[in-house]
Amino acid sequence: MPDPTAPEGATKDRAQGPVDGALAATFDGSALDVEPGNLAASVPEAIDELPGEPGIPLTATQAGSGEGAGFTWMLACVALVLLIAGWLLPWYVEPTANGVGYSAQDALTQTLSLTIEGVGSLLVVILGLCLIGLLVGFLNDLWARFLGRGTPFRYSRARVALALAGSLCTLLIAGIMGVPGAPALFGPIDSNAVADGAVWMTLTGFMVAAFAYGLPGPWLIGLAGAVLGLVSWSQPWYVATGIGAKLTPSASQQLLNPSSAGAGDILLLLVALGVVVAVAGLAADAVASLRGVTTPVLARVRSVVLFVGAAAAVLVLILVSGLHSSSPFGPLHFQSSPRDPLNTYAGNPAWMGVLGLVLAGIAARFPRMLLRRTVVLAVLAFAIGGAFPAIFNQADDFVAWGARFAVIYVLLALGLNVVVGFAGLLDLGYAAFFAIGAYTTAILAGPRFGLHLPFFLLIFIGAAMAFTFGAILGAPTLRLRGDYLAIVTLGFGEIVPNLATNNIFTATGGPNGDEAYPASLFGNNFGPLGALPQNTKFYFWALLALVALVIWLLRNVEHSRLGRAWVAIREDEVAAAATGINTVSTKLLAFSIGASVSGFAGAFFGAMLGTVTPDNFQFAVSVTALATVVLGGIGSISGVIVGALLIAFVINWVLPNLGSWTATAGHTVGVSQLSNVNYSQYTYIIFGLILITVMVLRPGGLLPSRARKVELQTGADPGSLAEVQEGA
């Protein structure tokens, strides 16, 4: 996607590095490079957002000099984890094989032993070489950082080329495996075999690596959209759970041989047009960049076509789900009810097609915005999050972990960050508002009182109830400060679960909890979390959409007058009051807004589990939420998200499963003692070690806010607040 801000007649290559890679539009980098003197003038809003570059202007302070590099390190680590996992895990498995199959490493072993020959074998070899090249580059950077020698991330353009080559090889291998009679690169598989999570891990890892080392945001998002569109168009869109098999035909086959005439075929034509436009537009932009044209080709028209194609894909899913009688995908073997989830449901390719067309439309419509690293990171994060159920399509328990713990803790961390990070108030009873949202769901959508309010209305009622109780608690107590306020909130956090245990007003069900109806959409009851694969996906995607809404609202509030008042109170409450800020009402709003986000999470949590018990809202939840904020970076939205994901992964996934992993390893190496270790009893020891390590090595957190980074690294002379926030 060409850079619309670069001047005509740009110069040739300068010294290689992440800045050049981030500004390069094509592989030779000739279209978008600019003269050093014109760099700030040509892209003033993006220069401090490039990987490896300072996040804070050097005229204010040197404190931000490593912030961009920190993002690059983080992205490179994520890319390598995905690539190594994708290389070692099975690529194609039977729907009932529980993840048993051949990996890319197995395919390479067959190739090197001359068991398998052909183009597919050559592509596997090239894929392995691309992975080795990126791994060697990362280790070289790590060694240079350890020795304090030079600047890491050299040869960025070569690494981008390796990542793009790896992505292309992955896509071609997937295409070859979809052709009847393809060589058995990944073992003997039949027509029901589906692409496992390793394929999507590999594609995602190469894309993240390309962005980390300098691929411009518009190109990254546009390329990801085109790839997802192509892959989804060639794969069957529906899965039959009753027989554990995918249903043919694919979208492309159905369009060529329609089984029924009607609205469905017209919608499929629109989806096909969107896929063609995504691929053709990317190719046209590449040709235009080589000719020095710096604007996307037919950007507005392309974006309209792509968004219409995405909407058509969603309508196809609704149409086939039984809301209408016509089905463009042939007989789906509905038995008892056209909405019965036990028969068929939309598979991963269908949802990936929607995601791909949306990403391609964003890249075509908003290329200037995608020059900002933070925007690209947000789009990339939510794209990977949207594809999460597809990446782990053979691990429903892992997707359930994402919905039950990872996304829930992200919401809790975002809400608590308003109180602790923005306003500087210490809240040790945050789990109380989480409980209020959950019990609101159980009361208003449960069998105890015979109520069954719509789920998507109920979550907002839960947030409003938490907001109200936040105001009730805050009104008499927010005149307190520091430890005194913390003690009051701690008491409130203990009172609410105890009231629930004592079945206050006979509304909470006592220690056994209260039942809540599961979520529903268009009259379709999705049941408890994890009961069926489509249930887990629905809850995860709904929570992801809610997280996006919360982040958008909090970002706007943070940069509003109210957000600036919170900053003033956090820095010096007496000085803030002297400037005319009503400190009590401003702190009360922070407390209530943070509580409402927790209420959102609680309402969703209650509907997912189906049963709300007091044990889910003990003091440990408040401590964990506070720890995620401290770990990620107080006051940093992106930081607390990373902290929440890390804590949820280590505490709620690694430790519960570590016993079985070490038992397997102990059986392999003959050390039986490893089978008897209960790692869950060391949860808080490991928790504490993580926090101590981070506080020693990165006192501001993993991704601290700009102002916090300045405070920690510049001592008594951080520069003016205006200078610090200039790059924000």
Image: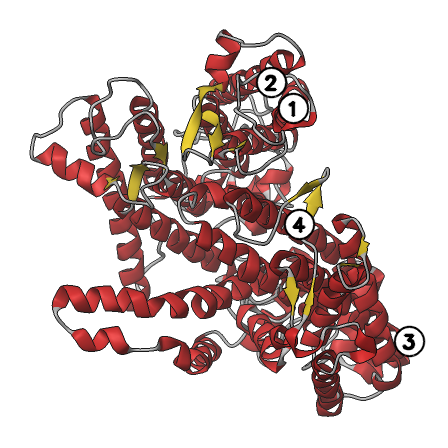
Tag 2 and tag 4, C-beta contact below 8 Å: no
| Point 67% across, 53% down: residue | 518
In this view, the residue in front, 17 or 227, is 227
Pick whichever of labels 4 and 3 is earlier in the sequence: 4
Q: Residues within 10 Å of mark 3 (few under 14, many from 20)?
A: some
- Mark nearest the camera among 1 and 3 is 1
Query: Where residue 725 sits: x, y (%)?
Result: 68, 62
* Residue occupied by mark 1: 319
- Mark nearest the camera among 4 and 3 is 4
Q: Give the distance between the C-alpha atoms of the residues marked 2 and 4, in whole angstroms.
A: 33 Å
| Point 72% across, 90% down: residue | 487
* Residue occupied by mark 3: 582
State the SS at label 1: helix
Farthest-out residue, front? 336
Pick whichever of labels 1 and 3 is earlier in the sequence: 1
Q: Inspect the image, locate mark 2, and give the three-letter code of the amino acid beneath it.
A: Ser
Q: Inspect the image, locate mark 3, and give the three-letter code of the amino acid beneath it.
A: Asn
* Residue occupied by mark 2: 327
Q: Inspect the image, locate mark 4, and give the three-letter code of the amino acid beneath it.
A: Ala
Pick whichever of labels 3 and 2 is earlier in the sequence: 2
In this view, the residue in front, 22 or 449, is 449
Q: Give the distance between the C-alpha atoms of the residues marked 1 and 3, in whole angstroms.
A: 54 Å
* Residue occupied by mark 4: 548
